[in-house]
Image (cartoon, rainbow, N blue to C red):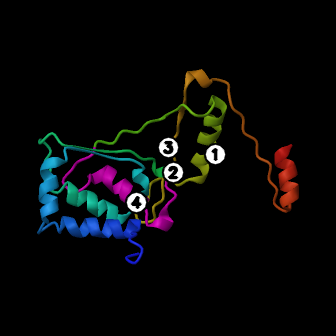
């Protein structure tokens, strides 16, 4: 990387963490940013890694509940797919319960599904409530299903069908899907 003047995400994250210092001994950058950052938005929070949570904690270490600063986190734990990149959906669940560092979070669960027809939403609610855990499990990163509500403009729309192909080869599967 140094020969080509490049860096990767891991190096940037490690450098940022080092530049911020520690919780007990914040670096100059952390002290400077403490006065400059008033609001932060974290999108796709369900795919945040432990090192990224630590960065958030360092960036908000001096924040208090009444100082007007805000941390807004958006994510859907049922969509967490980056465990191979060290994403820890269990931390998302803990953040929802305990906040991040000194910053309390107010959880808000959105339920209205604007993307799928009413029939699909009901099918999703029926099927996924049966195959997903009944309760969240932080250590394992298991997420319980959260039912959606269809929107009126998609009433009567959408259909689902299951066509199991347990022993089909790729060509048979392609013919079945094509129709």
The quarter of the rendered structure image containing the C terminus is top right
- Residue at left offset 61%, top offset 35%: 121
Which residue is identified by label 1? 127
Kindly report the distance in space between the C-alpha atoms of the residues bearing marks 1 and 3.
12 Å
Q: Tag 2: Cα neighbours inside 10 Å, few (<14), some, or many (≥20)?
A: few
Q: Which mark is residue 146?
A: 3
Q: Which mark is drawn over residue 99?
A: none
- In depth, the one of 93 and 55 nearer the eye is 55
x, y (%) of residue 29?
A: 16, 61
Question: Mark 4 vs mark 2: which is more N-terminal?
Answer: 2
Quarter where residue 48 is shown = bottom left
Magenta range: 80-105
Q: Residue at x 21, y 67 (%)?
A: 19
The residue closer to the viewer here, 82 or 30, is 30
Q: Secondary structure at mark 2?
A: helix
Alpha-carbon span between mark 1 and mark 2: 16 Å
Residue 85 is inside the magenta segment: yes
Q: Secondary structure at mark 1?
A: helix
């Amino acid at each position: 990387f140094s020969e080509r003047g490049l860096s990767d995400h891991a190096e940037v994250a490690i450098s940022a963490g080092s530049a911020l210092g520690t919780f007990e001994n914040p670096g100059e950058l952390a002290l400077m940013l403490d006065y400059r950052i008033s609001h932060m938005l974290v999108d796709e929070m369900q795919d945040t890694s432990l090192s990224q949570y630590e960065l958030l904690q360092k960036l908000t270490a001096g924040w208090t509940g009444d100082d007007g600063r805000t941390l807004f986190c958006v994510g859907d734990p049922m969509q967490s797919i980056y465990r191979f990149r060290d994403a820890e959906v269990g931390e998302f669940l803990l953040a929802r319960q305990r906040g991040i560092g000194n910053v309390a979070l107010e959880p808000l669960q959105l339920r209205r599904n604007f993307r799928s027809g009413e029939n699909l939403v009901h099918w999703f609610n029926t099927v996924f409530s049966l195959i997903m855990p009944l309760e969240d499990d932080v250590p394992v990163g298991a997420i319980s299903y959260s039912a959606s509500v269809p929107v009126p403009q998609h009433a009567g729309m959408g259909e689902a069908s299951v066509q199991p192909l347990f022993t089909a080869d790729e060509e048979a599967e392609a013919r079945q899907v094509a129709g």
